[in-house]
Amino acid sequence: EDKVVQSPLSLVVHEGDTVTLNCSYEVTNFRSLLWYKQEKKAPTFLFMLTSSGIEKKSGRLSSILDKKELFSILNITATQTGDSAIYLCAVGSGGGADGLTFGKGTHLIIQP
Amino acid sequence: DVKVTQSSRYLVKRTGEKVFLECVQDMDHENMFWYRQDPGLGLRLIYFSYDVKMKEKGDIPEGYSVSREKKERFSLILESASTNQTSMYLCASSLGTPGAYGYTFGSGTRLTVV
């Protein structure tokens, strides 16, 4: 059975801090790892990672995948209150229509 | 802008009622999915569909059924709602293999069964 574990499950930091969110996985036939941000509505796509060691960046957010050690990290630098959200890690496997497997999410709260 | 639309944002139903949750996508996506999201449990897959009239069970299909009569619409049905089905329900669609294309999510339906 595919498994995705995120840590920490919740995190409270002050504005301006840097945070690192973790995601480890055990899947058969790995295809990709995805990060989503969920505020009070639909989760929105952040990154898709398929290759080991290549950092993806978008503004203050960045993510990297380690396929040997089976984990990914999501970094957010200079955090802002608008970064407060649940961050979801998901893994896609196989070539069919099988759904993504999600972790439980990290609930990040940024205090002013 | 591409969209996945869930018909209701909030819904309150009584125990034993038949409940329909509707999801419509305008992207001509092949695959559609229903998840429920609960605190401490994350997103769990209920059912998915890879074509019209086709459906597959996910990890927690008990107490649910689905219908996909048209490509753009995927309905989740609670035949006889129970309080343990109180949850946030998220619909998602994918152009192809989710591992290659990811999901576009709807805004969710928060269902309360009383």
Image: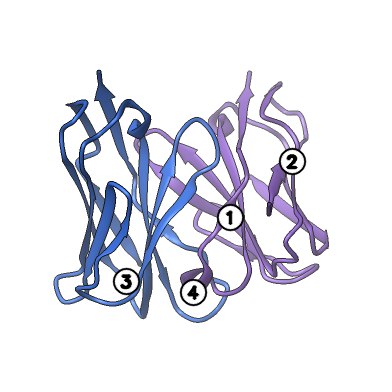
How far apart marks 1 and 4 lie (CA) works out to 13 Å
Classify A81 as above or below A22: above
* Mark 4 lies on residue: B100
Q: Relative to residue A26, is residue B105 drawn left or right? A: right
Chain letter belonging to callout 3: A
* Mark 1 lies on residue: B104
Give the amino acid at mark 3. Answer: Val
> In the rendered structure, which disc, 4 or 2, sits on the residue that comes first in sequence?
2
Q: Position of residue B82 (x, y in %)?
A: 62, 30
Chain letter belonging to callout 4: B
Badge 2: few (under 14), some or many (20 or more) residues near its Cα, within 10 Å?
Answer: some
- Chain in purple on the image: B
Q: Relative to residue A46, is residue A17 drawn left or right? A: left
> In the rendered structure, which disc, 1 or 2, sits on the residue that comes first in sequence?
2
Give the amino acid at mark 4. Answer: Ala
Q: Position of residue B68 (x, y in %)?
A: 79, 60
Q: Nearer the viewer, residue A52 or A30?
A: A52
Q: In percent of the image, x 76 and y 56: which residue is there?
A: B26
* Mark 2 lies on residue: B79
* Mark 3 lies on residue: A27
How far apart marks 1 and 3 lie (CA) works out to 22 Å
Q: Nearer the viewer, mark 1 or mark 3?
A: 1
Classify B86 as above or below A71: above
Rendered hue of chain A is: blue
Callout 4: SS: helix
Q: Are callouts 3 and 4 both on one chain?
A: no
